[in-house]
Every structure is written in C-alpha cells, then in structure tokens.
Amino acid sequence: MIADFHFLRPWWLLALLLPPILVWMASRAGDIRDRWKGIIAPHLLDSLVIEPERGKRLAPAWTLAIILALSIVGVAGTTWRRDPPPFVSDTASLVIAVDLSPTMDAKDISPSRLERVKLKIHDILAARSGARTAVIAYSGTAHLVVPLTDDADLILSYTDALATRLMPQPGKDTAAALRLADRLLKEDGGSGTVLLLTDGIEDEAIDAAKATEAGLVVLGVGTPAGGAVEGGGFAKVDLDALKAFGSDAGASVATVTDDDADVRWIVQKVATNFSRQTASTGDRWHDLGWWLLVPVALFFGLSFRRGWVTRTAAILLAFKLLVPETAQAETFEDMWLTPDQQGRLAYERGDFNAAAAHFKDPLWKGTALYRAGKFKEAVDTFGLSDTPEAWFDKGNALLHLGSFEDGITAYKKALEKRVGWADAEANLALARRLLKQQQDNEEPDQPNEKPDSVQFDDKGKKGKAGTVQAAAETSDMWIKNIQASPADLMARKFAIEAEQEKKP
C-alpha cells in the first residue's frame, strides 16, 4: 500500500508554500515592539510597551495554517487504493478442476478420494453462496462440466454424477485443465481462481500454470501411505511433488482434512486472489483526500470567536426563510460538492439513476446508466469519449443490447488504443462467439423444404432448434438439452469432444 501512495493532482502541493507564509506574516503583524520602534526611543521602548501574555492556546494563525495545509493535501487527491473495474463482478469467480484419473478411486480416504472431493464441493458452494462457480473434469483430456454460474443446485446435480468411468481417455493432463479454466475466466472478463482437486500433478503442468493469469489453489486428496484402487492397483499421494508445483507455479497448496478447515482455507484464498487481482487491474484510483475533512472540521472548531455563532445562526435562518424546502438539500450539496462528486455518492449508495443524472464525466455517467440497465443511453454516453475505456465499456453495453457486430467494432477500437488489453481481448472473443451463435441460430428461408423433413419445437414453431445435434452444441449450451441422466450425458459429451480434438 505504501508503494501505491501518491497524489492524483500533485500540482496542488505547490500551494503548501502558503501556510508558512501566513504564519510568518501573522507573527510580524503581532510584534508590538516592531510597530513602535520607529516612534518611541529605543531606551524607553521596554518601559512603555506592555506586551500581552502569551497564552498556551493554539494561535489563530497556526490554526488557520494547519487547516489550509490539510485542505491542500486533500485537494491534491491523496490515494493509495484503486477502484475496482466497474464491470467486474463483485464476487470472485471460481473454476473447480476435478481430477478423474483412475487413482481417484483409491480408498485411503473414506469412502474414496473422489467421493470426498464431491463432499468438499458441497461445502465450498455452501460457503460461497451466490458466487459464480464452474466445474471442469479431466484425466487424459479436459472437459467442461458446468460453465460459470451461481446456480448451486445445477452444479451439484452434475458434480454428484462425476465418475472416473466417464472419461474417454485415461491419464492425467493437468495442463489441459488449466488452459480450459484460464479460457473460461478470460471469456467471463473478470478476476478469478482455479482450484485443482487432485492426487497428483505432473511436471509438464508447470508451464501451463505459469501462463495462467488466474490465482491457483491446489487441494491434495489422498494420504502418503496410499490405498487400493477399485479394479486393482495401489496409489499414494506425492506430497513433495505437490509442494514443488506450488513453489514453481506460485500456487497455494494444502491437503484435504476431515473437518472444514480446508474449505475455509480455500474460500479465504479465493477472496484474497480476487482482492489482489481487482486492486492491480482497476483503471481508476480512489480519491481518499476527502477523509482530511474530518481533521479540518475539528480544527475549525478551534477558530470560533465572539460573534461567530450569532452570524452563523443569522445566515442559517435567512437560508431557511428564503430558500424553498425542496431546494435546500440540493443547494447545500451544490455549495460543497461538484456534480461528479454528488454522482459518486449516489453511485456508492447504489442509486444509479440519480448518479447518472448528476455525473458530467461521460465515462462515469455511462457506467451509472449501464448499472441502471439503461444500455441504449449508456452506449450514447460512452460515444462522447474516445478513450480505450470508453470503447471497452461501450462494447459491454452493446452486448447487452444484442448488437454483437457493433460490440466487436467497439472492442477492436479499444484494442487499437490500448494494445494487449487482456479484458478487451477476452470480451472480443466472447462477442465473436455470440455473433456466430446468433448467425447459426437464424432460420434460413427454405420455401421448397419437404413437409416430412420439417422439425417442430415445443411451441409448435418450425425451426432447427428442436433437433440440435450434440456434436454441434457449444460447451456452455449443452446443459439446456438434457434428456438423459447427468452421468450418461457427460459421458457422451466427453467422448464427442475427445473425438473432435483428434481431428486435424
């Protein structure tokens, strides 16, 4: 935090020359001997001049100098903390990668390693209620089980059905699981953590782990003594290999426990990773200079003199009589706060409509409109600025409106002005995928189609949506077409994806 300490408007610090000048001028004005030395003879000056006693109270000039200095530092924009990006979720996303290699059936942990993992997933979801979570299964290949969602019941219905027999290829390809998890988080456009629930990690996964932008957490499942594997064989956990992976890849590593200590550790690591990532990726610094108003107000309390209270009461009474009640609150805010400051206060209260009405800054006004769900107005407002952030935020609003082509153009503009922006690249890929899905789902005009080949959906409308082939389903849409048990559906999906990966 100390390394991030700086001033948003450092040129204001030049005004710090004023307080010492003020004190010097006040000391000169209060020197009675200096006033009379040109009129009274020096040998009579000590006898004729009676100087007032020096009280122990803080002199008014010093009080005013301290107030002025604190005010200048506050106006300079003291800060050491970033604002989180306005379009990032307020909760950390988590991708759980579950190892389904045959050794996960070992029974050195009751009832088995895999069954214990399922119980831990239940506890993790309960501890992260409302947060977005995705699940990946991997052995020789890696596959998406559930995309990022806050629907805990949906996640549990599929994770409870996980089994090693579902995987199309044996082995352990942790690198493929890490690449898939990293892609999910990038497409989501937010910060997150990848949790590996496994009994071992191969050396080849280190390079993939280093390339992953998300935080990495590993929970080792099993015991060093090992246990028998169903169907024959014996497996034990190589704790030294897990620790070496954590050291080389910068991952946090722990082992499974019988109580919920490991779950609390995981949740804490996810929250820590989220705070660190949002703090380092925020584009705007949080202006903390206004906190200096507290000591300024305290020092102003020392500046009261006879007559000040009376004058203040008269001013407040006149204000009460002359200004309509409906306008008094607004007038007080206008006296002390700029429109953008008033908008920021409303924004932090969650009153996004009021914030949008106050903001003059196009980027903040557009952000408030976006949060209020007024995406069309947000697009128009973001268009008033030509910064990369404005183009990026405009693209986000266009996606909500379904204008995927315009969204792609906006993200491209953002990348032209800020090359290599990871968030913009991830959202650009998402916009292209959504546009392709939109184009694929459009019904072509086929007037000569034979009646016996026409398909009907559940609403009685013609279209291809009623008979979607499993091979053409995308990773985040296949769940919507459930007509079999979760286990059978996952086994079929994993097999199809494995076959597609083999094709050149």
Image (cartoon, grey):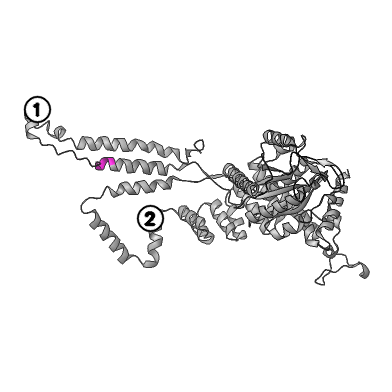
Outermost residue toward the top?
Answer: 43
* Vertical side of 307 occupied by 29: above or below: above
Q: Secondary structure at mark 2?
A: helix
* Vertical side of 424 occupied by 210: above or below: above
Query: 253 or 105: which is nearer to us?
Result: 105
8 relative position to 407: left or right = left
**What label sits on residue 221 in the rendered view?**
none
Q: Residue at x 72, y 34 (%)?
A: 240
At label 2, counting other C-alpha atoms closer than 10 Å, the crowd grade (few under 14, some 14-19, many 20 or more) is few
Residues in magenta? 54-62
Q: Is residue 135 magenta?
A: no
Q: What residue sits right under mark 1 in the picture?
A: 42
38 relative position to 155: left or right = left
Marks 1 and 2, how far apart in space? 53 Å
Outermost residue toward the bottom?
Answer: 460
Q: What residue sits right under mark 2 in the picture?
A: 335
Where does the image place residue 191, in percent across and percent down from the top left? 64, 47
Where's the C terminus, which quadrant?
Answer: top right
Count every numbered label the image shows and give the total.
2
Q: Residue at x 87, y 51 (%)?
A: 495
Amino acid type shown at disc 1:
Pro
